Amino acid sequence: PTKTKQILTEYGKTDLGTDEIMPEIKKYVAGKNYCILVFFNKVEKVKPFNIDKTGFGTMSAWITVDNINKLKEPKN
């Protein structure tokens, strides 16, 4: 519990965008034995677009590519 609180205190505001950790989040993470933190650099805001995930498998919620245009579906 102490380590969980430490991680939430240190990274919660950045991740959740708030100083207060909601009770639902506290309940969700209570008793967890692991934490995955992902840090990004050179983040750019882009306009939403449709993608073609063909060939990336069914569990492709996170995809990394060197060129985002490889995923964009052609506009009709």
Image (spheres, rainbow, N blue to C red):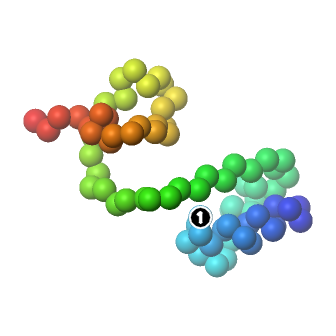
Q: How many labels does the image show?
A: 1
State the residue lying farthest toward the right. 2
State the residue lying farthest toward the bottom. 19
Q: Can residue 23 be seen in this view?
A: no
Instruction: Name the residue: 44% across, 25% down.
Output: 56
Residue 44 sits above or below residue 49 on the image: below
Q: Can residue 69 be seen in this view?
A: yes
Position of 30 with respect to 40 (left or right) is right
Quadrant in the picture for the C terminus: top left
State the residue lying farthest toward the left. 76
Quadrant in the picture for the N terminus: bottom right
Position of 57 with respect to 24 (left or right) is left
Q: Name the residue under label 1.
A: 15
Instruction: Name the residue: 69% across, 49% down.
Output: 36
Position of 59 with respect to 72 (left or right) is right
Amino acid at the residue labelled 1 = Asp
The image position of residue 22, as x and y in percent, is 67, 69
The image position of residue 26, as x and y in percent, is 75, 63
Instruction: Name the residue: 52% across, 29% down.
Output: 59
Instruction: Name the residue: 68% across, 62% down.
Output: 24
Residue 48 sits above or below residue 5 on the image: above
Residue 63 sits above or below residue 18 on the image: above
The image position of residue 15, as x and y in percent, is 59, 64
Q: Quadrant of residue 28?
A: bottom right
Q: Residues within 10 Å of mark 1 (few under 14, many from 20)?
A: few
Q: Is mark 1 on a helix, strand or loop?
A: helix
Q: In which quarter of the image is residue 25?
A: bottom right
Q: Quadrant of residue 43?
A: bottom left
The image position of residue 64, as x and y in percent, is 46, 39
